[in-house]
Structures are given as structure tokens and as C-alpha cells.
Image: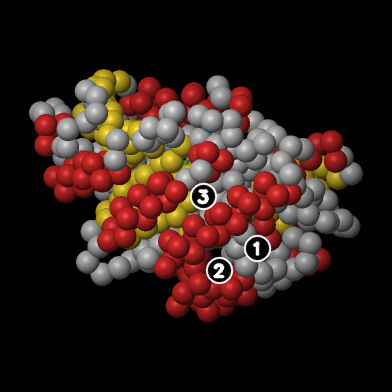
Amino acid sequence: MTKVPPLAGELVLDAPSAFGDASRDMGRMVYREPGAVLRPASIQDVGRMVALCREHRIPVAAQGAGHTTYGQRLVGGNGLAIDMRTLAGIEPVRNNRVVCEAGALWSDVVITLAEQGFRFRGGLTGYLNLTVGGTLSVGGISPNYQCGAQVDATARIQVVTGQGHTLWASAAENPDVFTAALAGLGQVGIITQAELALAPLPRRVHTWSVPYSTAADAFQAMRTIMTQDLLDEVYCTVRPPEHGTHPTFLVQLAFYEVDATPPRNVVDTLPTPIEPEHYDIKTYLDHVTLDTAVIDGWPVWENRIKPWFDVFLPDSSAEDYVTRTIDAMTAADWSHPHGQGFVLLFPHRADRFRRERLRVPRQRGDQFVWLFDVLNSGSTTPSPDEVEQMLSRNADWLDAACEVGGTLYPIGSQPQTTQLWQRHYGPDWQNVLNTKARLDPAGILTPGARIGIHATT
Ligand SMILES: Cc1cc2nc3c(=O)[nH]c(=O)nc-3n(C[C@H](O)[C@H](O)[C@H](O)COP(=O)(O)OP(=O)(O)OC[C@H]3O[C@@H](n4cnc5c(N)ncnc54)[C@H](O)[C@@H]3O)c2cc1C
């Protein structure tokens, strides 16, 4: 790379040993070594290097915590990886909003906000050691079924576009950039800061875990809670069958106690569970950080392939699709070794999803949308056959979902082609291409998404 501009941070060239993290992701199936890694110390560093890369048509990828699973964050050849985690500042809360740099981890954001008496209004991912920019680039789905995705509670973002321009964008200011960058898979710009909407910190959180043996009971329980609108969180963890029995559908409910006390007899209106529900009261921080602590203490995942599958389903076909898919899952679909994988179901109110680039089913009359995730692991040294089999499973599952009105949530392991992206964006495809051509004219940004409109790596 020639004529490198003055930088406050570090540009690492010719040090492949430093590139371990930058060359892989959580899926452990795709490896691609960049030509250089930037560890920016300022937003200007990002702008200057993107402008240089545009001039020389060098591919660039912003990198967060590395938790997508099929090379979405990778850039090979002479490409530049930008390690966003060095831009992790969080400003004090002002007017019920907080401004954070995109490399801040959500685990740090929630603590900083709680210290000031707030929580993020958009809900949190189950695992929190993800960057703000990483989840806003994909959407960010939480169990908070009433508030859409994290991008829906994001008021403004600062973006370095593929032209190398740094600008703020919101619904009123550069709205085209705002629309294209939120859940935009890094295609038009690198998010460098985000202004997030906040809510008061709950005094405590009441939780219920209610186990069922069938999808039908679990769906009925979740629909009952959502229709009554009494609680703050609803989701379901499905655990694999043990010794030839049925899977367990654990419906997880939470109520945030701010002013009002929790509704009484929450579980009485639900189908009868297979065991008594588990009820607990925690602080908000203990509640939202629980899964992160469990996952970080789970080394068995570390070097295994993780061919994860994620799809949104319309309410009208969700129960049938989920039941059929789970009934047909093999031991390998659940996980190898047994017990290290699970399925998640996140229901949401359909009308709360307002950001265009997050493709959720928008069937008229459907009150809810469901995110269905299969989180399974495989071998540490997989054969090409094992990887091929899992990717082809995901392709089949996605086709089946699309046939019933489902859409891809592109955080997992999906062998996408340009044609499949065209199907994904539907009538907005031409707009996606036009916006990309305008904001990233050299086609340098985020080639790992495989949208097929990039400079070659
Ligand atoms: C255990 C686990 C649990 C999860 N739970 C949830 C969940 O509950 N809900 C949910 O929605 N997701 C969940 N995810 C998925 C997660 O939200 C996405 O994988 C997210 O993109 C990861 O962020 P990251 O910081 O690791 O980014 P990376 O994996 O490093 O990058 C992800 C993508 O975003 C791009 N990118 C990163 N930073 C920026 C930026 N600043 N500007 C532009 N583009 C950028 C990258 O180039 C890449 O394409 C989970 C993942 C894991 C591993």
C-alpha cells in the first residue's frame, strides 16, 4: 500500500501472525487473510484509509467481535481489515440518548447505561460481547417483542461511506445513507458512531421459564403473552431430545419492574407446562448478562464449525415450518457433540420493524414475525463433506422458508449468490444496487457478504 496518510492509530502490514483474528470468524469454516489491518485511534483514521482504498480499489471490511459465521467480515488478497474495537468510546447520556463509537461492546454499553439509570430501548441480543456496529449492520434481534430490532431504536448514525466521506445520518439528515447503512451489511459505509434511544433502568426483572413438550403449546403460550401485552420479553429455547424423547420448548418470559408491579398469575393463562415453571427476580444487569457469562464459559464451541441457520418467518406459517423442521432434525442438525446446540425462537410484533434493509416478512394481516435460529456445532477438523452437508441443509431450509414467505437473517452460514440476494431484496434490489453504486462507487466495502458487486479481492 503506497502513500499511507498520517494516522493516529496503527496500520499493521506484513505481520500475518497479527492477522489470526482478522482472518476468521465464529463459524470456523471460512478463512481469508487481509493484506493489512488498521487499528484506528480516531474516526479520521477510518475516513482517510477508506478514501485511500477507494482511490486504489482496495477492498475493505470493518470488523467487530467476529461473531457472524460465514466470512461476512473477511477480506482477502490485498484487502484492508479495520478492527473497529479500538473505537469503543461511550459518551454520557443526554436527553435520553447515548452516543457510542461503533466498536463498543454491548456488554460495556449496558453497564455504562445502568450506572446512569438507563437501558437501551431497543432490546439486547442474548450474547453481549458483540460490537454496536456489528449488530446495527445486521439488525439486532432481542426478546423484546414490542420494539422491533436494535436498528429501530437507533436515532442517528455516523458513517464513513465508500467514497471516504464522514457524515451523520438520520431520518431527517442524509436519510438515504441512514436507510442503506442500518442493517445494510456494511455495503455502503462503515458505521463509526451511533446515537441510541434509551428507557429508564428497571428496578428489577421478574422472569418465568415455562417448559413444554410441543411446538404447539409453546406457540400458544407465546401468542397469549404477546396478545395481552403484559410483559417485556418473550422467546423460546428449544433443547434437543434426550434418549429418543421429545425436544423441550422452554418459553422464557420477563417483566421489567419500573413503576408498576408485575401482573399476577402470568402462567395461569398459558397451556399446562410439563413441569412447574421456574420464577426468579434479578437485577436488570444480572438478567441481561446471564447468557453472555454462560457462552463465554463454554469452550467446547471455540474451534468447532458452527453452521448456524437464521430465518424470519411470517406468523401464518411459522408454527408449521418450525414443527416440520424440528421434527426432521437429525443428531448432526442438533449438534456434535450432542447437547452443544439448540434452537431459538424470537417472536416480534411485525409492525415494529421499520428499517428497509432488514428484510422481515411483511404479509398483510400477520400480527407477528418469528426469528428461527439453529445454533449447532460440528467437528473441529471437518471434512469437506461435513461442511458441504451443513451448507446444503441451510440452503434447503432457506428455500423452504422462502416458499412460505420467510426471509433470511444474514448472520449465519448461508451460501448466498447474487441471484439469492436478488430474491432477498425483492422489489428493492435495484435500489440496493443504485445506492451501493452511489455511496461505494469503487465497490470496495464488505466483500464477505458475497452480494456480488465488489472490486475483486
Ligand atoms: C453467541 C451469539 C449470540 C447471538 N445472539 C444474537 C441475537 O440474540 N440477536 C441477533 O440479532 N444476533 C445475534 N447474534 C449475531 C450477531 O448479532 C451478529 O453476528 C453480529 O453481526 C456480530 O457482531 P460483531 O461485532 O461480532 O461483528 P462481526 O462478526 O465482526 O461483523 C459482522 C458484519 O458486520 C460488519 N461490520 C462490523 N462492524 C461494522 C461497522 N462498524 N460498520 C459496518 N459494518 C460493520 C462486518 O464487516 C460483517 O459483515 C449472535 C451471535 C453469537 C455468536
Q: Position of residue 422 (x, y in %)?
A: 54, 73
* Of marks 3 and 1, the one in the foreground: 3
The picture places residue 19, in percent across and down from the top left corner, at 79, 40
Amino acid type at circle 1 is Arg
Residue highlighted by disc 1: 450
Say whether marks 1 and 2 touch (CB < 8 Å): yes
Sequence order check, earlier mark of 1 and 2: 2
Mark sitting earlier along the chain (3/1)? 3
Rendered image coloring scheme: secondary structure
Compared to residue 369, the image places residue 144 above or below, namely above
Q: Tell which of 211 and 59 is nearer to you.
A: 211
Tell me, for residue 421, which label it has, or none: 2
- At horizontal 74% and vertical 54% (from top left) the residue drawn is 75
On screen, residue 219 above or below 279 = below
Q: Which residue is mark 3?
A: 309
Residue type marked 3: Phe
Residue for point 16% across, 48% down: 227
Q: Which residue lies at the image location 16% right of the left edge and 37% below the top edge?
A: 270
Q: Element under label 3?
A: strand
Q: Quadrant of the N terminus?
A: bottom right
SS state under label 1: loop
Residue 259 vs residue 374, the one in the foreground: 374
In space, the residues marked 3 and 1 are separated at their CA atoms by 17 Å
